[in-house]
Amino acid sequence: MSAIAAAGLVGLAACAAPSGQSTGGSTGGDNIGGAQSQVSDATAKGPAKEIPGAQKGGTITVLEESTPDTFDPTNIYYVDGFQIGKLTYRTLTQFDIRGGKPVLVPDLAEDLGKASADGLTWTFKIKKGIKYQDGSEVKAQDIAYAVKRSFAHDIYDAGPTYQLDYFKDADKYKGPYTSGDTYSGVETPDDNTLVIHLAKPFPDLPFFGAFTMFTPIPKGKDTKQNYDKSPMTTGPYMWQSYTAGQELKLVKNPNWDASTDPVRHQYVDGFHFKWGGDAVTAQKQVLLGQGQDATSMEVDAIDATVVPSVTPDKKSQLITGESPCTIVEQLDTRKIPLPVRKAIAMAYDWEGMNKVSGNTPISTQPASTILPPAVPGYTKFELPNLNGKGKGDPAAAKAALMAATGGKGFTLAWYYSNDSQTATKVSAFRQQMLEKAGFTVKPIGVPKAKLRSYTNKYDPAPNPINMLWSPRGWCSDWPSGSSWFPVLFKSSSIPAKNSIGQLSDPALDQKIDAISKLPIEEQPAKWGELDKYILETYLPALPFYYDKAAYLAGSKIGAAQNDPTQGLPIFTQLYVKQ
């Protein structure tokens, strides 16, 4: 559903994809699971099935080096924001993890929606009696307002954009602040009925309904850019305090009704999320488990230097599982000519990049494609210098660079977190690697808390940045290439700030649209073909690795399990061992 955290990159990939998981220590290897299918259960009801042995009370601390830049439900599109959002924001639908597999179930809705015969109208009946933390009742109009709010993309510029492509009159409506409350794409015949009108069929709409964009927002409570400071919540937890870039404290929501919620629990008294600390230091502390560290988690991928400390008696503290995401090194195709991009690919020392990043076979597998193996349509192929392996060839890269530029060379620039030890080391290694190949390199350091606000701007010239824009990788919004290529590689991806490579080619747009219109069963093979075509034709990024979940939990945390839709813990089922 958005981005994925990578401590060495200190930036996230965008969204997440359903697939399986396991718990306990892993020895790594090349198998990270096969393609997943879309599974749903429209009959699921609350309350959620009890977790065996779960106890009530205590506070869980969650540590992460990367810093979420928003908790506004309209603007969330990174996996950490989504996963925290599940604790506070109920949505039309949600994923229930059953036997390690995600199953789409109703959340605020009574079922998974009913589509009209032509697929252009969807009707969702909203459960009655669901309340906000202040005791006021949720109405369908609040969800409709949240949908309208998402069209104010000039303000909520980091959020998902499927509605801009699929919903009726999306090209005309600019959100409630500019266009008013009247929008033809959504209506509410009564307080418990939400109707969505589409411009073209969108069979995956129930899966899109799990996004925080579909959490209710009362119009009278909308404070625009300040909304995430004190939002209206419907989940088991609510805001106690929030300091942007540093920490978020959640406490129990007294008006959450477990009987209507098929996926969430309220075992602990609260959560304390803290960002910006050094991941390696925190991982060592969590593994030792002294005092508060025993009830803490560090959710960045376990660093290679920490793995030897996972002794047999601590093996259960290493939580592993699938995370169907691909991490890449972005190349701005507007600013870097294709022959130069090919020279960059020749120069990359992937062995060195993995080592300095702290990657291990437990948490990563070398990538050679855009689609990860978990997505239907994944086709294994390896193009020259694009397999995430080897030490690179700086001499050949330099020769190619000079031939491409007439001996003038080329300057590369990117943003990195200068207050992160790992990110600083990775940036320095990348600089040395590319300088050996004849490039002039000018990295620009910025605070990690502000990194995402810099890397999602896609500034054109004269801004010198021409590498490593956001997203640094992608995870499926649902298991289909339709949640990858239309989002990442169309011309519209640039203003939506979800672009990999900043491609703007009408011919490619047409190819993507043509596949999107095919029957669903015919799409996977075509997405696999398009994957290879894009890398061969445009080289918008260098595939780095397929991500695998591997993070640490304190010894007193119960029910620590990976959520395969995000590659992060299932926060909604955690408890503290008393």
Image (tube, rainbow, N blue to C red):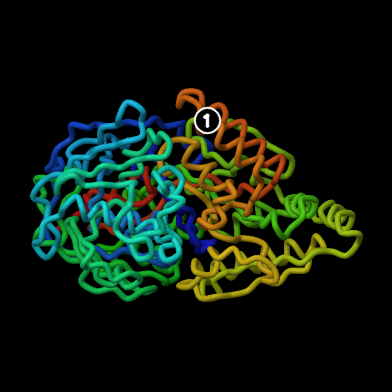
Residue 238, x across and y down, in percent: 19, 64
**Position of residue 264 in the picture relative to residue 505 (left or right):** left
**Position of residue 567 in the picture relative to residue 513 (left or right):** left
| Residue 427 location, quadrant | bottom right
Is residue 291 visible from the viewing direction of this image? no
Residue 325, x across and y down, in percent: 48, 45
**Position of residue 371 in the picture relative to residue 112 (left or right):** right
Is residue 317 visible from the viewing direction of this image? yes
Q: Amino acid at mark 1?
A: Gly
**Position of residue 387 in the picture relative to residue 80 (left or right):** right
Q: Nearer the viewer, residue 82 or 507?
A: 507
Q: Nearer the viewer, residue 373 or 220?
A: 220
Q: Nearer the viewer, residue 561 or 372?
A: 372
Q: Residue at image x 32%, y 73%? A: 226
Q: Tell me the quarter of the image containing the C terminus.
A: bottom left
**360 above or below 515?**
below
| Residue 354 location, quadrant | bottom right
Residue 75, x across and y down, in percent: 38, 60
Q: Residue at image x 66%, y 46%? A: 505
Q: Residues within 10 Å of mark 1 (few under 14, many from 20)?
A: many
Q: Residue at image x 73%, y 61%? A: 433
Residue 49, x across and y down, in percent: 15, 40
**570 above or below 419?**
above
Disc 1 target residue:
377
**556 above or below 519?**
below
**215 above or below 222?**
above
**Figure label count:** 1
User: What element does badge 1 sit on?
Assistant: loop
